[in-house]
Amino acid sequence: MSEFTTADKVAAYVGGGLVVLGVVVIGILEMIAGSPHPVSSEGQIVHEALVPLEVRSYIIVLGLLVWAVYAVYKVVATTPATEPAGSV
């Protein structure tokens, strides 16, 4: 299996791209933008994200779902290799 099929490419690029976008790209964007983390009067840190945490979480989960669907597809669609008759 040295060449990628279309399903392999979709899973790698779409699923991987969404996970990298949600984790790395948005994380770097948050660091560069310097989102404030003020402390309330009770000492609790108030997190004000540039990209809402729900949106970031949904992006990551969507990437993981693409990988999960791909894994199920590979299990169902591929047949295991069989040995020729008479070889032991």
Image (cartoon, rainbow, N blue to C red):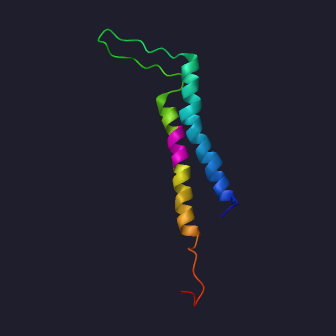
Left or right, residue 31 beside residue 45: right
Work out which residue is located at the far left of the displayed protein and give it.
Answer: 42
Q: Is residue 47 above or below residue 40?
A: below
Give the residue displayed 59% in from the left and 47% down from the top.
15
The one nearer the camera, 56 or 23, is 23
The one nearer the camera, 24 or 88, is 88
Give the residue displayed 65% in from the left and 52% down from the top.
10
Q: Main structural element of the magenta stretch: helix, strand or loop?
A: helix
Work out which residue is located at the far top of the displayed protein and give it.
Answer: 41
Indicate the position of residue 40 as horizontal and vertical percent values.
Answer: 35, 11
Residue 49 sits inside the magenta stretch: no
Give the residue displayed 48% in from the left and 36% down from the top.
57
Quadrant position of residue 20: top right
Magenta-drawn segment? 59-64
Quadrant position of residue 51: top right
Indicate the position of residue 77 as horizontal and vertical percent values.
Answer: 58, 68
Work out which residue is located at the far front of the displayed protein and give it.
Answer: 88
Indicate the position of residue 63 as horizontal and vertical percent values.
Answer: 55, 45
Give the residue displayed 56% in from the left and 62% down from the top.
73
Indicate the position of residue 3 as horizontal and vertical percent values.
Answer: 70, 60
Residue 60 sits inside the magenta stretch: yes
Q: Which quarter of the rendered picture does the N terminus lie within?
A: bottom right
Left or right, residue 12 beside residue 76: right
Work out which residue is located at the far bottom of the displayed protein and give it.
Answer: 86
